[in-house]
Amino acid sequence: MNTTSDLEKVQKLVLDIVMIERDHNIPGSDRHENVVEHSMAVTMLCWKMYNQFEPDLDLEKVLKYSLVHDYLERGLKKDVNTYADASAKEQKKKQEALELARLKDDFSDFSSMVGAIQQYEMMSDEESKFVWSIDKMQAMILGSIDNWRPY
């Protein structure tokens, strides 16, 4: 095991995700939010909501899901948003299936990350549904801060 190269793989994955733009701008600028910024915001909002409402959820799962919930978008130039047409959504699903296979291969030694991605995608537990809901709220919160510019 080469720890340096293993850590470099993780860092490169994060850099790949940084390159994916979302529709929302950073308020006060023309720069688009990227997926890492979005994921960090979702993670913080999840933590805040968890702290405020103390739901009967596993916080560790919530935080893991929120960090990796958009990792299947690696390889895209721009996020496909909720309002995209059916064709774009179908193409995104195909791309995400390919990306999951790639992540399984690239990170066979980091099965807990890949497992978190898979569990989140299945939406089979309350933690994944909690994160999904906050993910949708984050876009609205950012839009509100930015005078609804993306809408």
Image: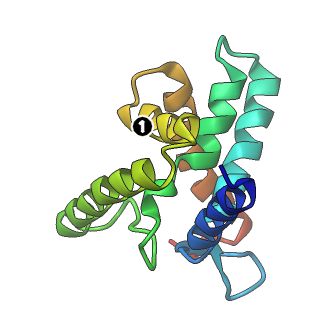
Number of numbered tags placed on the structure image:
1
Q: Is residue 126 left or right of residue 55?
A: left
The amino acid at mark 1 is Gln
Residue 55 location, x and y as percent? 68, 15
Q: Residue at x 57, y 34 (%)?
A: 112
Q: Is residue 54 above or below residue 63?
A: above
Q: Is residue 111 left or right of residue 97?
A: right
Q: Residue at x 51, y 50 (%)?
A: 107
Query: Nearest the camera: 66 or 28?
Result: 66
Q: Is residue 49 left or right of residue 117?
A: right
On the image, numbered disc 1 is attached to which residue?
A: 118
Query: Nearest the camera: 88 or 69?
Result: 69
- Farthest residue in the front direction? 1
- Farthest residue in the left direction? 87
Q: Is residue 29 above or below residue 127?
A: below
**Does dot 1 land on a helix, a strand or a loop?**
helix
